[in-house]
């Protein structure tokens, strides 16, 4: 049985370029009525989904690119239940896909074939919050935005923020090492996660309760309890780091301890128009120097991205474009008349945000920064949000790009790290390459770039009227080869998932891949955890 | 053969409490003349030390607590040489101790028996520096202070700083996950290390050059090359994290890529006197709120620490103590007349430092902070360094405590994480416990506390005229049990090394310890890398 993938991107590309097909692992068990009966006994009928219609959202990602064929989705409420169900799946060799908010972009959280889905949706409680230190402990299924609101009521904020915050789960954020909008200030989850609780597929110690069945799962040696809230703890290997970004291939994260940041007393947001990409990087350098410790986000989007967001999303405007005339009249569909560098708009926009403890100081710093970048020409126009509503509206322009691309039609998404100063050259090179092959703007194909420029992270997107294998073959492996040649990363923050498992070697050497494999085998000898993802099959 | 340990602390305690002795692993090879000849051929005569006198500094730590018996120390200059010598040691099953600046406190970097020492001292080159992003790549043996000066000339600073900076190596810092003075601002090495190059004991891939001998070590599958300078890279498991804090038990770090921080335009340092420990924590909370994003260090020391530093170190003064009368006249030895809460001195001192981009703003923030803490009584006296020299002098008071303790006589050192607000209760409880058993101040025993209060990290030290097993048996396992009961860490930043390998279970559960063991076995199946350290022997 080959994987059914709704609109394949890299996987079909891999099949074409690397001649590797994804085939169901025949060693895995198949779900039986007896299995379902066991799950219902363990979780109650409400915790087990088997109705085909009800299974649909578990079987496919929000982009509808990856479509699996699971027969059962489970919604445990406790760590003990997760431990007990992994004990069962391990003994039956049933493959398992952990699923959080299912907001990923690389097919990591949906089944490829008939894997059992274990959803964290019913595990959404805050377990502990220390109002002095700002350490938060929550179950894995807590929604990022809810946690941020919870922390906000106590004077703190979550150290990460991303477009999917309203539906993504903290356990999924950690499993995928989500980056997002404020990594430039608050760092990565490898620094801010203080502790984890993880259920492993096989027991590693204390066989005391191994065959005890029915709850008490903590005692059967499957629960790796690293749930501390200490800022510093140098007692042996920092095991939690292994699970940050493992995309559920090593176990299921059931709880997370995280260091929240103090909620800033003062927030400022500027939207700036830049005449060229070198001007964007010049403004970035100035922001680093003059905004220093209050700088909290530096994002960019190109002009086509701005047009897409304003054309395809209700109520989204670019306040630097008056009247909307240059935006193509909000036509929707494939014919917005978008051109690169259209009259009345700038080729690039930047969002520069500050978080600080003193509004007067922060305003002074921002004013001096704006004077500097307007003075040296790296910024030609700009606006400072005068209210929280205006700030939200500006953020919506940037955060809406991803959704607008999906609404426009087919979209090929890439998420790469490259040296900042030459990052946009990839967009331009690919645009020229596609246009030369008949996939230019006149054919409705747009090659656009946006992302977290403060972190060297480019989101490269190719929007087309429909998915087309000829177009795809011009994009891949070209993009991966380009990134590899420039010592970049083929996945800055989206992860590997199913989409890039065959492409891992563009970013990792054979020794690294082999070490990953051996760690996977030690933790999950039957390979039941999120199979076909992250690691490419061992070469024959 | 039992380990010879100059002045045993936890190990002898473990022998007493846990009835586990450290015995040489009989499976390890013994150094022969043929081995030495091979090393000399590989490294040249200057790269191989065999003279007993010259071996002494490799065989013992700076505290002279841990004394090994190596017959050979090697000083490779390149990664290829490290790869080739590990290939040789692996084939001969010769045990290996990686050694950086040998400034550790837990016996992690000295041999226990006759392990081969591999020193990184001759690998001290800066390989790359990006003046825009501040990413630094250096060989593992580069000295922290030299790197900080190198970065400083380019407008950046190293993201960590510690008392041993003049001699510790960056590879050792990473291997031990060094914390230090500014973690509160710049985060841990798990966040700031961007890439590593590590030589593994066994080859993991590409057997191409496995038996090729003589150089070209990179090709034999032992070199794990993760030496990227990307801020974001989500391509598979974040393997470098495993080696951060592994204390050389998984391989030898040969190069480090690290994110430097912008060097601050403005630095301020205040020394404050607090009337009680609750006042210290109150001032900490105020500092977090009012100094916010410019806060770069919050340290504390108790009055006995201040006395010890001024009494035992040349030129160290506490500027808040006039004339030095309360300091015991600088008598040295065991009879300084130190009393807790002596007249003229405060029971606690704090160092509060800011790093910022705007001197005016930073000064305003600091002034308001000082007004607030003087106003609410959490601080009773204070001084703000008016020059870099004054700041250095204040830092010397804090950083000199460790050295002063060693000069005074015997010292038992503990490094724990505990909830900040009740952290000092351990010092008081132990002080009372020892005094009740005849080990009070009148017997020359001082129980003192200092450390990184901003990170919940207490350095608990017991200074005595001489090492005494009766005294030690009152300290251990009492301290570990106390910390374990309060959900703390028995090693916040010093690591486990030899000293605490038997005590790991006070901070880590059996599943975690077993997972560490399995990872160790996957990477180092013969256990030749830094044996007897970090992991306790598997229970029989």
Image (cartoon, coloured by chain):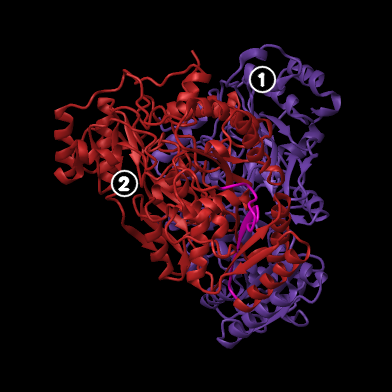
Chain colours: A red, B purple
The crowd level at tag 2 (other Cα within 10 Å; few <14, some 14-19, many 20+) is: many
For this orientation, the residue located farthest to the bottom is B375
The crowd level at tag 1 (other Cα within 10 Å; few <14, some 14-19, many 20+) is: many
What percent of the width, then of the height, locates residue A373? 73, 64
Residue picked out by circle 2: A120
Can residue A430 be seen at all in this image of the molecule?
Answer: yes
Q: Which mark is residue B410?
A: none
Q: Which residues are magenta?
A: A338-358
What percent of the width, then of the height, locates residue A324? 54, 61
Residue A525 against residue B278 in the figure, above or below: above
Q: Which mark is residue B87?
A: 1
Of all chains, the one bearing label 1 is B
What percent of the width, then of the height, locates residue B190? 58, 47
What percent of the width, then of the height, locates residue B480? 47, 53
Foreground of the two, B96 or A411: A411
Secondary structure, mark 1, is helix
Foreground of the two, B116 or A88: A88
């Amino acid at each position: 049985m080959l994987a059914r993938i709704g609109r394949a991107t890299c996987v079909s590309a891999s099949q074409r370029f690397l001649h590797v097909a994804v085939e169901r692992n025949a060693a895995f068990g198949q779900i039986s009525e007896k299995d379902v009966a066991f799950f219902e006994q363990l979780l109650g009928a409400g915790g087990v989904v088997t109705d085909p219609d009800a299974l649909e959202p578990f079987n496919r990602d929000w982009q509808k690119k990856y479509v699996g064929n699971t027969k059962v989705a489970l919604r445990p409420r406790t760590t003990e239940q997760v431990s007990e169900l992994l004990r069962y799946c391990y003994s039956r060799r049933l493959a398992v896909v952990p699923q959080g908010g299912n907001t990923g972009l690389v097919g990591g959280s949906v089944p490829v074939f008939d894997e059992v889905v274990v959803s964290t949706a019913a595990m959404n409680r805050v377990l502990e919050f220390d109002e002095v230190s700002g350490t938060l402990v929550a179950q894995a299924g807590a929604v990022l935005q809810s946690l941020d609101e919870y922390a906000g009521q106590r004077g703190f904020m979550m150290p990460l923020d991303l477009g999917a915050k309203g539906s993504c789960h903290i356990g999924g954020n950690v499993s995928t090492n989500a980056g997002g909008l404020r990594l430039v200030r608050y760092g990565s989850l490898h620094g801010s996660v203080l502790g984890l609780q993880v259920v492993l597929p096989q027991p590693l110690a204390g066989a005391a309760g191994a065959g005890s069945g029915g709850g008490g799962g903590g005692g059967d040696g499957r629960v790796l309890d690293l749930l501390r809230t200490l800022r510093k703890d140098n007692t042996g290997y920092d095991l939690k780091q292994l699970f940050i970004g493992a995309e559920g291939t090593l176990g299921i994260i059931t709880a997370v301890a995280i260091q929240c940041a103090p909620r800033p007393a003062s927030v400022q947001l500027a939207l700036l128009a830049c005449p060229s990409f070198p001007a964007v990087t010049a403004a970035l350098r100035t922001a680093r120097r003059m905004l220093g410790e209050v700088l909290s986000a530096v994002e960019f989007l190109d002009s086509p991205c701005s047009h897409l967001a304003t054309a395809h999303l209700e109520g989204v405007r670019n306040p630097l474009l008056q009247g909307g005339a240059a935006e193509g009249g909000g036509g929707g569909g494939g014919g917005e008349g978008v051109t690169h560098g259209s009259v009345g708009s700038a080729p690039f926009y930047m969002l520069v945000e500050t978080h600080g403890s003193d509004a007067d100081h922060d305003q002074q710093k921002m004013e001096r920064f704006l004077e500097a970048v307007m003075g040296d020409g790296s910024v030609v126009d700009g606006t400072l949000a005068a209210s929280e509503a205006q700030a939200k509206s500006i953020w919506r322009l940037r955060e809406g790009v991803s959704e607008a691309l999906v609404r426009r039609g087919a979209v090929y998404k890439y998420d790469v790290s490259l040296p900042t100063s030459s990052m946009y050259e990839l967009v331009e090179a690919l645009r020229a390459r596609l246009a030369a092959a008949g996939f230019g703007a006149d054919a409705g194909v747009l090659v656009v770039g946006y992302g977290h420029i403060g972190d060297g992270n480019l989101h490269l997107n190719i929007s087309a009227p429909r998915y087309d294998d000829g177009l795809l073959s011009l994009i891949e492996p070209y993009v991966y080869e380009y990134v590899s040649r420039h010592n970049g990363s083929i996945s800055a923050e989206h992860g590997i998932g199913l989409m890039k498992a065959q492409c891992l070697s563009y970013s990792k050497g054979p020794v690294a891949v082999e070490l990953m494999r051996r760690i996977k085998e030690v933790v999950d000898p039957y390979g039941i955890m999120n199979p076909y993802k992250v690691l490419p099959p061992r070469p024959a």
